[in-house]
Image: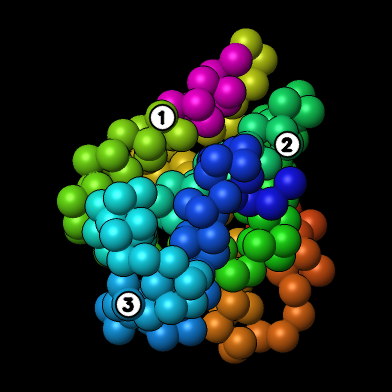
């Protein structure tokens, strides 16, 4: 299923999906700040009124795309965690799902990196904070299950995601920007091993 289908399913949402596809392409090629509603209108061959009706303004479009990416990424992460049993499995699930999502959705991942600051400092910052809180709570609850997570107990909860995902995120950013050529999937096992070592040695 196309990423947008899960957030905006059905035939009645086709125009929304068309607008969002056009916006994603414009934001990635022109930059978020330089992109105008008129550029998006031309790209998706609709009216300015339709864009404003569905998304309110440019900030609404930026946030809608960002939240759709978050939802898709979370779905993959939850799928991987559902199959994990041990703490190490859980660490691997977080790294593998992150790397595999970026490799599968490079345009969305590139956009997500570029839009994070805009959304976190714009009118949808509270909604983003709430979504991040829910995501972190879900991960925390997984690692709080009986018999799981003891290796993480000595670390501050807010530090754990960075310890696990930090190296993978750094390499993915380099790959998306063209600074390195090999797909992050080629190094997913090495990145997962590095993440495990960073949280299992205290």
Sequence-wise first label, 3 or 2: 3
Marks 1 and 2 in Cβ contact (< 8 Å): no
Badge 3 vs badge 2, beta-carbon distance below 8 Å: no
Q: Which mark is residue 80?
A: 2
Quarter of image, res 94: top right
Report the magenta residues as a range. 137-145
In the drawing, does residue 64 fall left or right of residue 2?
left
- Residue 133 in sight in this render: yes
Query: Is 95 or 132 nearer to us in this picture?
Result: 132
Residue bearing mark 1: 134
Coordinates of residue 120 in the picture (x, y in percent): 26, 54
- Residue shown at the point (64%, 33%) measured from the top left: 78
Dot 3, how many residues are within 10 Å of its Cα: few (below 14), some (14-19), or many (20+)?
A: few
Is 104 drawn above or below residue 177 in the view shown? above
Q: Position of residue 175 (x, y in %)?
A: 63, 78
Q: CA distance from mark 3 to mark 1?
A: 35 Å
Q: Rounded to the nearest whole Å, what is the CA distance between mark 3 and mark 2?
A: 40 Å
Q: Kindly report the secondary structure that dominates the magenta region of the rendered protein.
A: helix
Q: Give the secondary structure at mark 3.
A: helix
Residue drawn at x 36%, y 66% as measured from the top left:
47
Q: Which residue corresponds to mark 3? A: 38
Quadrant location of residue 132?
top left
Q: In the rendered structure, which disc, 1 or 2, sits on the residue that comes first in sequence?
A: 2
Q: Are marks 3 and 1 in contact (CB under 8 Å)?
A: no
| Residue 142 drawn above or below residue 31 | above
Q: 10 Å neighbourhood of mark 1: few (<14), some, or many (≥20)?
A: few
Which is more N-terminal, label 1 or label 3? 3
Q: Is residue 83 left or right of residue 3?
A: right
């Amino acid at each position: 299923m196309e990423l947008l289908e899960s957030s905006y399913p059905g035939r009645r949402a086709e125009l929304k999906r068309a607008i969002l596809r056009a916006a994603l392409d414009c934001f990635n090629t022109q930059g978020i700040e330089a992109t105008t509603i008129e550029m998006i209108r031309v790209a998706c061959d609709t009216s300015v009124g339709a864009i404003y009706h569905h998304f309110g303004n440019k900030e609404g479009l930026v946030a809608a795309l960002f939240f759709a990416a978050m939802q898709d990424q979370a779905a993959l992460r939850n799928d991987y965690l559902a199959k994990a049993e041990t703490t190490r499995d859980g660490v691997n699930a977080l790294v593998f799902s992150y790397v595999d999502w970026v490799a599968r959705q490079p345009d969305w991942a590139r956009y997500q990196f570029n839009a994070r600051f805009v959304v976190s400092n714009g009118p949808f910052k509270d909604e983003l904070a709430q979504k991040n809180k829910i995501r972190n709570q879900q991960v925390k609850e997984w690692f709080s299950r009986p018999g799981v997570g003891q290796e993480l107990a000595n670390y501050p909860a807010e530090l754990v995601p960075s310890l696990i995902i930090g190296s993978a995120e750094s390499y993915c950013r380099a790959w998306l920007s063209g600074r390195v050529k090999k797909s992050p999937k080629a190094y997913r096992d090495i990145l997962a091993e590095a993440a495990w070592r960073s949280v299992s040695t205290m």
